[in-house]
Amino acid sequence: MMNWNVLPDLCAVALLTCAFASTVRRSQAKTARLWLGGWLLVAAHFASSLFLHYPGIVGTAGLYTGTITLVIAGVIFQTAVIPYKEEPSRRWMTLLLAAMNTLYMILLIAGKSPAWQLNLAAALFAAGPLLITLSAIRRFNRKIRWATVILNVSLAVFLLHFQNRPGIGSYLAFNAVLCTVFLGCSINFLFAYRRPTTGSVISIIGFFAWAAVFVLGPWLFYAYPAIHVESEVWNLPKFIVAVGMILILLEGQIEHNRHLALHDPLTGLPNRRLFEDRLSSALDRARRSGTQMALLIVDLNGFKKVNDSFGHHIGDLLLQRAGAIFTGRVRRSDTVARTGGDEFSIVLEEPVSRTEAMHVSHALLELLGEPMLLGDDSLVRISASIGIAVYPEEAGDMESLCIAADRKMYEEKMKRSAESNPQKQPAAKPLTA
């Protein structure tokens, strides 16, 4: 009675799911956990298929369970990849698609549902997604959402036209729903991964092939009934998709590790290694074009007192705030890096002159001089010392430019220290009611 033909596929999917789970453990993305849930449902689909040949309620339960788990897995794959995680209508669209597909498949498999019930369920494929899209259109109006609407409206039109035909209507409707679900996965992956990678390309092709199975299968069945295709061939796209998804996660981990290697984990700014690379490139561009560029080295005055008075947590918040101030003041073509504990370096690229660099320096000092409310009840006041070196006016290479800017920063720091009395001007004070 057991349908042993699906056992090899079940074992293969189970192994791929285990490999997928191992990859997900190392990934921080919520999408990865949703994908894992989808593959667990695919494994449940194959497990349910073992009981399809059982007579009575066991075989029926296997058919219902196998179909519903496959449909919901497809919906999860389709909606989990949408990049707008905080959009409320995304969650409602996921629940609606899962509910609509489940309801329709239950009515279709039951086989005794009145025509009006099937027609109403088919019409929901058009009305539901369109209603959610229109209700959220002012807040969320993206091509990826309209692609879902168009796909489901097309499905509704097809179902209303074919589902009630005697003989083949139910068979065509069944395959049309599954084809639409996995074609939606391919389209959403195409929208989500605009920068093609090996994993995304394999996943897009795999989902498209998975959807095509539900078109080619019925066509071969009716056009060439003598041709028999083994189930392993029809299940091949599932394994292609699994491999593609695993590659996407591995590519994401590699990119994340590369980012960590080149960026400061606290502020997210480039670290010294990436700063030196950016500075070297900026110098090369300035040499080729015969223009100037400037290097600013910024040291926060009073940072140690903030750490001693308020703790390292507030000190970390101060560094993050300072990094945000610097990034917000310079151009996107410039570079802001954290190159030491409380030291930041800024590369100002062309067109720039000493006057412009001084203007940026004064603006940064004014912004840093404003009181900063950090945490729940800490009002912090700091200042900074900034050293400026301009290429090629003061240095002709990277090392000389850094030395010149560093020397001027320390001269400025000593000057400020001599002019001020830190005991009378504390670096920070708590905010009182």
Image (cartoon, rainbow, N blue to C red):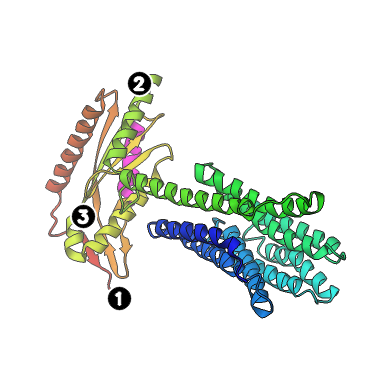
Q: Magenta part mainly helix, strand or loop?
A: helix
Front-most of residues 407 and 26: 26
Residue 173 versus residue 191 in the image, above or below? below
Give the mark nearer the N terminus: 3 vs 2. 2
Q: Residue at x 64, y 65 (%)?
A: 71
Q: Which residue type carries mark 2? A: Arg
- Disc 2 secondary structure class: helix
Label 3: element kind: helix
Whether residues under marks 3 and 2 lie with C-beta atoms below 8 angstroms apart, the answer is no
Q: Residue 282 carries which label?
A: none
Q: Where is residue 76 in the image (x, y as percent from the top left)?
A: 58, 63
Q: Using a 10 Å C-alpha cutoff, classify the residue at mark 3 as few (fewer than 14 neighbours), some (14 to 19) or many (20 or more).
A: many
Left or right: where does residue 27 sit relative to residue 156? Answer: left
Q: What stretch is highlighted in magenta?
A: 355-367
Q: Where is residue 226 in the image (x, y as percent from the top left)?
A: 77, 50
Which residue is labeled 3 in the image?
303
Q: Name the residue under label 2.
A: 287
Closer to the observer: label 3 or label 2?
2
* Inter-mark Cα distance, 2 to 1: 56 Å
Left or right: residue 70 compared with residue 106: left
- Does residue 187 appear in the picture of this structure? no
Give residue 171's quadrant in the image.
bottom right
Q: Which of 31 and 66 is in front in this view?
A: 66
Residue 396's x, y, as percent? 26, 22
**Quadrant (top left/top right/bottom left/bottom right) for the C terminus:** bottom left
Which residue is nearer to you in this view: 399 or 242?
A: 242
Q: Which of marks 3 and 1 is nearer the N terminus?
A: 3
In the drawing, does residue 162 fall left or right of residue 125? right
Q: Which of marks 3 and 1 is in front?
A: 3
Residue ID for mark 1: 433
